[in-house]
Amino acid sequence: MRRPFIAGNWKMNLNIEEATTLASALAQQTASFRNVDIAIAPTHLALSSVINAVKNTGIHVASQNHYFEESGAYTGQVSPTMLRAAGVAYALVGHSERRTLFNESLAEVNKKMQAAFQAGLLPILCVGETLAERNQNSAESVIKEQIETALDGLSADQVAAVTIAYEPVWAIGTGITASPRDAQQIHAFIRKLLVDRYPAFVAEDVRIQYGGSVKPHNAAELLAQPDIDGALVGGASLTVDAFVGILHAITETQG
Ligand code: PGA
């Protein structure tokens, strides 16, 4: 059985003080959720302080982005080894905002996946189609290309440790979610891709999160789908009530 995994992507929100306050509140209010993995991804600037605030709790800390080199003359970049040394456990890779706003290429996403593993970070690989791509019936081919290029060169054991976040671009920050049925269809498609390319344990182990306007009121229905193993949450991860509300919804689906 895959353990549900809920991650909050705080994006470029919350300064050090605000991030630490939220992390401390979550540390207190999530102690009872024992059957779900939880991660939060603050701005780089707040990582140390947030890591400190959630120490010895079940909450893991994720980074939002990293460069693929280990060190050197790369002004403004942060390396995965630095993040690991700071206590970061998970690394978001290939979020659609990075792909579209910062022109992150498929090749770059692959390098970041490899660099994450080399540093000991567990990647959360974000994939998803735009509305235009969905309307052209090319959602599956877009996602297939994003996944195959991102996982290229990784061993089966490494792929088994990846979390894939399916985030339809048109659902991110819009208040529109994919219907549970449509989301399940893509999640099943992603799992089939893994079945076709890797030994059976890989597709059984990989957790596939849904992302895109996940809120307390829609989380249970999404998470009840057989191939939806968790959620990557943006807006609703910025307040204790909404994030904890999502955790409650998920616990309900577990019975
Ligand atoms: P949202 O963001 O929940 O605000 O739609 C999701 C994401 O970008 O990961």
Image (cartoon, rainbow, N blue to C red):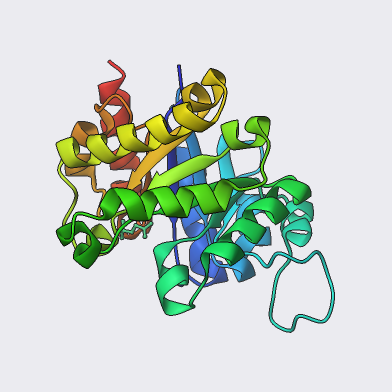
Residue drawn at (51%, 44%), measured in percent from left and top?
39
**Tally of numbered discs:** 0
- Which residue is at a point 24% across and 62% down the rendered structure image? 133
Residue 117 visible (yes or no): yes
Q: Nearer the viewer, residue 11 or 155?
A: 155
Quarter residue 251 falls in: top left
Residue farthest to the right, as pictured: 72
Name the residue rendered at 37%, 59% in the picture: 238
Relative horizontal placement of residue 170, taking residue 208 as reference (left or right): left
Where residue 7 appears, x then y in whole percent? 45, 46
Q: Is residue 72 above or below residue 183?
A: below
Please tell me in which quadrant of the rendered image residue 176 appears: bottom left
Residue 188 left/right relative to 206: left
Q: Nearer the viewer, residue 228 or 130?
A: 130
93 above or below 203?
below
Could you tell me if residue 13 is visible in this image? no
**Could you say where residue 217 lies in the image, as x and y percent from the top left?**
17, 42
* Quarter of the rendered structure image containing ligand 1: bottom left
**Image: 90 above or below 248:** below
Name the residue: 40% across, 64% down.
96
Q: Give 65 or 130, whichever is nearer the viewer.
A: 130
Quarter of the N terminus within the rendering:
top left
Residue 208 point in image, percent of width and height: 41, 37
Q: Quadrant of the C terminus?
A: top left
x, y percent for residue 109: 57, 61
Q: Is residue 187 left or right of residue 159?
A: left
